Image: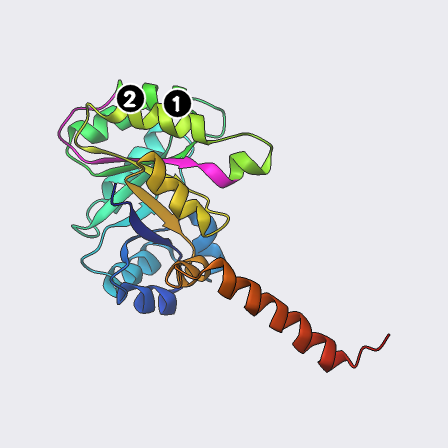
């Protein structure tokens, strides 16, 4: 499986930088990343992102909390660029499944990224509400599941199996915690993994031997002990 790397970021300077990297095949954002990047006007800032990456897929998220507000925002966002995927949370804050909206947007041939997914149950629900033509990404949050002691791998494997009948559906590994997650995503057959810039930089350096890692580590300890003037 050739797992595609998307960059999970909203800072414009970093988007411009990572858009030049062949290893990066697309971008994902969310309202939290946009706020952190200093965005004040959501539409204006989103269009700046699209200008920085006009050809690679870019996922931009709605932030409404009900069917009508999400639909209104989704219909606007999808017009901002041909490379836009509209991110829809699998449920709203009241834990109501957004199946009706997903189905409607999907049937209107709007490219979707269904986000905040944690279980294969969610994946099954999503698949029941989409066709087999319009492009859909299902983003499963591995790191956040691991943060609370849940093993995300079984949910990924079940979701990938369920999605096999849908050539228009891609399973995305979200909330990366370490570079090795990329290796894990490839091993289980994830179509996409979205990664923050600092971890993409580390993946670029994959291939070091255990011997060289040992040598680098020991040299680091020795260097710091000398700098500190430690004596026993």
Which quadrant of the rendered structure holds the C terminus?
bottom right
Report which quarter residue 138 is drawn in. Answer: top left
**Distance CA(mark 1)–CA(mark 2):** 8 Å
Determine whether, in the image, residue 33 is placed left or right of residue 214.
left
The magenta stretch spans residue 137:
yes
Q: Nearer the viewer, residue 213 or 65?
A: 213
Residue 91 visible here:
no
Seen in the picture, residue 211 relative to 195 is either above or below; the reply is below
Residue 174 percent across, percent down from the top left:
41, 42
- Residue at which label 1 appears: 120
Determine whether, in the image, residue 216 is placed left or right of residue 124.
right
Residue at disc 2, secondary structure: helix
Determine whether, in the image, residue 204 is placed left or right of residue 94.
left
Q: Nearer the viewer, residue 62 or 175?
A: 175
Q: Which mark is residue 162?
A: 2
Which quadrant of the rendered structure holds the N terminus?
top left
Residue 129 percent across, percent down from the top left:
25, 20
Q: Which residues are magenta?
A: 129-143
User: Badges 1 and 2: C-beta atoms under 8 Å apart?
Assistant: yes
Report which quarter residue 159 is drawn in. Answer: top left
The outermost residue toward the right is 232
- The residue carrying pointer 2 sits among few (fewer than 14), some (14 to 19) or many (20 or more) residues within 10 Å by Cα, namely some
The earlier-in-sequence mark between 1 and 2 is: 1
Total numbered badges shown on the rendered structure: 2
Determine whether, in the image, residue 94 is placed left or right of residue 148.
left
Q: Nearer the viewer, residue 218 or 4?
A: 218
Report which quarter residue 70 is drawn in. Answer: top left
Residue 97 percent across, percent down from the top left:
39, 22
């Amino acid at each position: 499986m050739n797992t595609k790397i998307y960059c999970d970021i909203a800072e414009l300077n970093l988007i411009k930088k990572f858009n030049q990297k062949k290893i990066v095949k697309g971008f994902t954002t969310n309202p939290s990343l946009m706020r952190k990047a200093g965005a004040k006007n959501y539409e204006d800032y989103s269009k700046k992102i699209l200008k920085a990456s006009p050809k690679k897929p870019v996922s931009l998220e709605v932030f409404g909390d009900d069917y009508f507000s999400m639909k209104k925002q989704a219909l606007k966002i999808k017009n901002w660029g041909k490379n836009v995927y509209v991110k829809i949370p699998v449920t709203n804050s009241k834990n109501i499944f957004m199946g009706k909206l997903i189905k409607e947007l999907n049937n209107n041939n709007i490219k979707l990224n269904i986000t905040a997914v944690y279980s294969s149950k969610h994946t099954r629900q999503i698949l029941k509400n989409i066709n087999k033509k319009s492009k859909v990404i299902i983003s499963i949050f591995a790191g956040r599941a691991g943060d609370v002691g849940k093993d995300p791998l079984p949910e990924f494997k079940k979701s990938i199996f369920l999605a096999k009948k849908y050539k228009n559906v891609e399973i995305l590994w979200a909330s990366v915690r370490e570079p090795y997650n990329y290796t894990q995503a490839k091993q289980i057959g994830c179509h996409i993994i979205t990664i923050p810039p600092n971890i993409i930089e580390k993946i670029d350096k994959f291939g070091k031997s255990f011997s060289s890692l040992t040598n680098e580590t020991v040299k680091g300890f020795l260097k710091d002990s000398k700098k500190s003037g430690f004596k026993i």
